[in-house]
Amino acid sequence: MWCGNEAALKEFDVGPVEDKLPLSNAMLERLNALSQWHDTALNWEYPPDPGP
């Protein structure tokens, strides 16, 4: 649910929280799928372009 990299942890003092919440395996799988979709939605070559 939150950025899982050192830059985010340093800047915002927060990291991944999904493992700390009482979520079912199905919900964790759905969160993972949504995170992957989100991470690929931005056109890194030209970010202002619309995404899917």
Image (cartoon, rainbow, N blue to C red):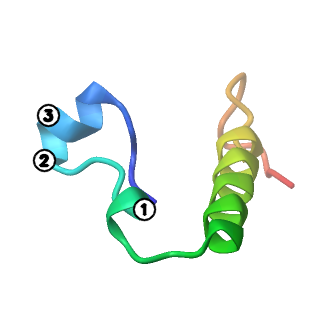
- The residue that label 2 is drawn on is 13
Name which residue lies at 37% across and 72% down: 21
Label 1 – label 2 distance at C-alpha = 15 Å
Specify the quadrant of the image occupied by residue 34: bottom right
The residue that disc 3 covers is 10
Type of the residue with mark 3: Lys
Q: Distance between the residues labelled 1 and 3?
A: 19 Å
Task: Say what amino acid the circle numbered 1 marks.
Answer: Glu
> Around disc 1, counting alpha carbons within 10 Å, would you say few (fewer than 14), some (14 to 19), or many (20 or more)?
some
Residue at coordinates 74% horizontally, 34% vertically from top-left? 43
Q: In this view, does 28 lie above or below 24?
A: above
Disc 2 secondary structure class:
loop
Q: Earlier in the sequence, mark 1 or mark 2?
A: 2
Q: Badge 2: how crowded within 10 Å, few (<14), some, or many (20+)?
A: few
Badge 3 density bin: few <14, some 14–19, many ≥20, Cα 10 Å: few
- Give whichever of 39, 27 is nearer the camera: 27
Q: Which of marks 1 and 3 is in front?
A: 1
Of pointers 1 and 3, the one earlier in the residue sequence: 3
Q: At numbered mark 3, what does the secondary structure look like: helix, strand or loop?
A: helix
- The image quadrant of residue 20 is bottom left
Q: Where residue 9 sits: x, y (%)?
A: 21, 39
The span from disc 2 to disc 3 (Cα, nearest Å) is 5 Å
Q: Is residue 41 above or below residue 47?
A: below
Q: Do the residues labelled 2 and 3 touch (CB within 8 Å)?
A: yes
Amino acid type at image mark 2: Asp
Q: What element carries label 1?
A: helix
Residue indicated by mark 1: 18
Count of marks, rendered view? 3
Depth check, front residue: 39 or 33: 33
Provide residue 10's location: percent of width, then percent of height. Answer: 14, 34
